[in-house]
Image: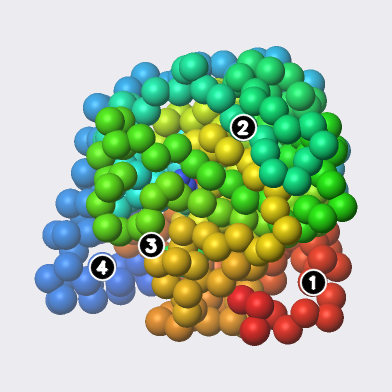
Amino acid sequence: MLIPSRASGFHLPSSEITPKDVYEGRRDLLRLMAGGAAGAALASWAGRSALAQTLPPRPGKQAPLQAARSAVPGAVSLEKPTSYLDATSYNNFYEFGTDKADPARNAHTLKTSPWTVEVEGLVRKPGKYGLDDLLKLGAQEERIYRLRCVEGWSMVIPWVGYSLAELIRRVEPQGSAKYVEFVTLADKATMPYVGSRVLDWPYTEGLRLDEAMHPLTLLAFGMYGEMLPPQNGAPVRLVVPWKYGFKSAKSIVKIRFVEKEPSTAWNKAARQEYGFYSNVNPEVDHPRWSQATERRIGEDGLFAKKRKTLMFNGYEAQVGQLYTGMDLKKFY
Ligand SMILES: Nc1nc2c(c(=O)[nH]1)N[C@H]1C(S)=C(S)[C@@H](COP(=O)(O)O)O[C@H]1N2
Ligand SMILES: [Mo]
């Protein structure tokens, strides 16, 4: 049921708003107006819906799916998924700009076909996979994961893909392989910010081999039942739901098995702020802000209501044992 809100004239579903929200929302609104920021907040909100009018067409069906829903423990969150519009218009993909709206505006230039992913380093069966062959290496299924960004916001997204472990088993890592490095596309011709000094390109990431082998670590090809749109890392990306979002590398071109902990784009940019592990941990603050709470995208704006951040982003039961005995303040 829709009820009119007398204060604003907006229509809000009654199921999603409580008197307390209304009260707190109005108080926030008054505070913002007193500070002169309401105009700016409303303008950026309007900007987002205006952006929706200009977005390229959605990419279309991701097929075939082996399972509509995953049987991997913890892989299907019961939380309400973030809207498709929010998940595809509020992104971090620095190759296309540093503003959250830049990837949706700019990433249509990304050329995802042909696409090759090279598997190299300490494996018995290295090789180059075209996207179609890569798609067939594992049983694709839907997983609903929370993804939390180190900046303090989160989303709930239905991804499509298979466990990276399926690929890893096929290429047979050698005994000396202890880490996996992910290298992503850095193409100046199609990615306007590659070459800028914000990061050292290509964007790279890494996982310990056992983290990479954990069944929750997803090699994703789609979201919301469709192929990944460019701004979310088409045609293939990683999703590591218990780590800060930046570990989930987009538009991967190389998967390399190595002996030593690889350095990553964010470690190189600011070692004090972004460690190799980057597990979501409400008890370890970022040097410049707390990590104890988060804002769920779609629940933001003037009715902002923060959530408590959960240890390992809520995946502690599944992944906690990977870190027993480790000092998580030292290995942040
Ligand atoms: N290649 C590449 N991958 C990337 C990034 C990036 O800038 N470049 N940003 C990371 C960050 S900081 C986050 S929070 C997530 C955002 O994923 P989403 O836009 O699909 O929500 O992508 C990660 N993967
Ligand atoms: Mo992020």
Judge whether residue 23 can be spotted in this image.
Answer: yes
In front: 213, or 254? Answer: 254
Residue for badge 4:
29
Closest to the camera, between mark 4 and mark 2, is: 2
Label 4 SS: helix
Disc tally is 4
**Kind of residue at badge 3:** Phe
**Kind of residue at badge 4:** Leu
Residue for badge 3:
303
Q: Would you say the residues marked 4 and 3 are in contact, meaning their CB atoms lie under 8 Å apart?
A: no
Mark 4 → mark 2, Cα distance in angstroms: 51 Å
In front: 20, or 328? Answer: 328
Label 3 SS: helix
Measured as percent of width and height from the top left, residue 50 is found at: 22, 36
Q: Which mark is residue 323?
A: 1
Measured as percent of width and height from the top left, residue 220 is found at: 63, 35
Q: Is 243 located above or below residue 212 in the figure?
A: below
Residue for badge 2:
118
Q: Quadrant of residue 244?
A: bottom right
**Marked residue nearer the N-terminal end (1 or 2):** 2
Q: Is 203 located above or below residue 38 in the figure?
A: above
